[in-house]
Amino acid sequence: MGVMDMKLAPPDQAEAPLLSVRDLGKMYGERIGCADVSFDLYPGEVLGIVGESGSGKSTLLSCLAGHLQPDQGQVVFQTATGPRDTVTMAEAERRRMARTDWAFVHQNPRDGLRMGVSAGGNVGERLMAIGARHYGDIRAQAIDWLGRVEIRPDRIDDRPRAFSGGMQQRLQIARNLVTGPKLVFMDEPTGGLDVSVQARLLDLLRGLVREMGLSAIIVTHDLAVVRLLADRLMVMKDGHVVEQGLTDQVLDDPQHAYTQLLVSSVLQV
Amino acid sequence: MTDQAYNFAYLDEQTKGMIRRAILKGLAVPGYQVPFASREMPMPYGWGTGGVQVTAACLTPEDTLKVIDQGADDTTNAVSIRKFFQRTAGVAVTEATTEASIIQTRHRIPETTLSAGQILVYQVPIPEPLRFLEPRETETRKMHELEEYGLMQVKLYEDIARHGQIATAYAYPVRVEGRYVMDPSPIPKFDNPKLSGSAAIQLFGAGREQRIYALPPYSDVVSLDFDDHPFTASKAAHDCALCGASDSYLDEVITDDAGGRMFVCSDTDFCGGRRAGGHLGALGVAGAL
């Protein structure tokens, strides 16, 4: 791992990492969910996590985002008041952070949206959760964000049920980014969408990440997605990280046997 | 006389003790829903089983009981509950708000200001104000615990987005003492301001949902709203046709098949008292009491 670490020189050494993960592990009874995961994520950086189904990448993401309680390890997040271990902090504080500094984009928009609430209400919920109490302001921000994710403002009072899959996913992104988070967790954000819709969504995500200076952790099994979005890549197998490095480096010159298999398995059109 | 087949006020003493403990806890934590072991009552759920159990636990032989249903003393629900306690507790009953020491109510707060020493018992169908937004009880409890009330505001947002104003007209959510968001039971929002700063003890019982919550006297109760869409206590824009009152909550009564209708006070005791005092509305008859 020594050689690998040197390759992973962060973009700016003087800056403190936004997220610092050490020896993170989660067991499901006797079975390993994920184990011995350590990495640093710097501000503005996008980290991709790839691996096959059951490799522990979603478990890892859930542990990082506080949806699952890890059995061991630290997840230190750079809050406004300094670094804090999110594993040991009080739940109230962690949930507040999940509403303000973090965002979580689910694979299925139904998990991340309130399907019975209008698009505007969905986008406004996080604002109201942190204390916004002016209807006009909330609505103006909702319209602004719908525009940014290419949803026409006249759809603001429609429910997500009336939206296509791609629109639902874009709405979920708007809902998450409206409070200006620093870190976005994405679980297969393009899963289940057809390729042209995927392409537009990826384009949108790439623009937003760059424009807002977001850091992101993207879990996917789609290597094309990480090639487009991620600066760095982690490859997981059986709950362990088997290889990590710059995305292009890992994909073009895979070192681990499993990564080689993964890269060579991609169908060429 | 009390029917000797029953313990005083129908419930056994252990059950009443259990309910009193829940009430005391509720009073200690205003607006917090205290679970309690709700009993089967000789009436269907939805007819006030929660309110009846709370009333039974509060009653003493010296009490005077008043029961109202939508403000009226003479509707089915009110009459049957009043008779129930006459038979099982033998307490005095009254229709006058000022004479009652315990008032059980369904969906109204009396117009007459309540005084210290009185207890107002509400019948509550669904005690959880977040229920229709978040179906999981585990999650709503967590939201109360962590004061995550953004979702409640989303409901009001949806109202304005769809209707141009906050269209919630009853069961309008309130925040108690700056802490718990509470469902005030399906009282019209016209009554919401009366929840705050009342000298009486206000107890809420939900039998099917097995929850009791409470407002101690002089609690601070604020109706939720937006800065640019403030809460307004609304009522029909008429005067009472019988007593002429312009400041009471009105029921609309259809009088014929040709669109004829009249608006009358929903609080029968208040309306009768005004008419006895000489106030007369457009359709009122002097001495009609």
Image: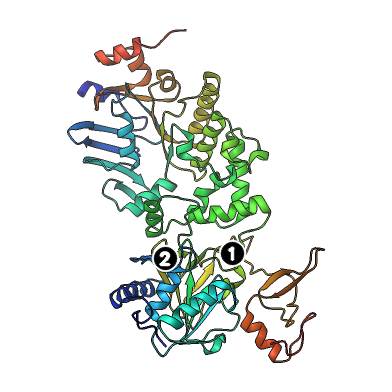
Q: Residue B92, image x and y in percent?
A: 47, 88
Give the structural element (helix, strand or loop) at label 1.
Answer: loop
Quarter location, residue A74 = top left
Decide which of A99, B254 is in the foreground and name it.
B254
Answer yes or no: is residue B195 visible.
Answer: no
Decide which of B246, B260 is in the foreground and name it.
B260
Q: Quadrant of the C terminus of chain B?
A: bottom right
Decide which of B283, A29 is in the foreground and name it.
B283
Real-space Cα distance between discs 2 and 1?
A: 20 Å
Amino acid type of the residue tagged 1 in the rendering: Tyr
Mark seen at residue A62: none
Total numbered badges shown on the rendered structure: 2
Classify mark 2: residues with Cα within 10 Å, few (<14), some (14-19) or many (20+): many
B289 to B26, vertically: above or below? below
Mark 2 vs mark 1, foreground winner is: 2
Q: Residue B123, image x and y in percent?
A: 48, 69
Q: Residue A180, image x and y in percent?
A: 49, 43
The chain carrying label 1 is: B
Q: Which residue is mark 2?
A: B207
Name the residue: 28% across, 41% down.
A75
Name the residue: 44% across, 73% down.
B52
Q: Are tags 2 and 1 found on a single chain?
A: yes
Decide which of A147, B67 is in the foreground and name it.
B67
Give the structural element (helix, strand or loop) at label 2.
Answer: loop
Q: Which residue is mark 1?
A: B170
The chain carrying label 2 is: B
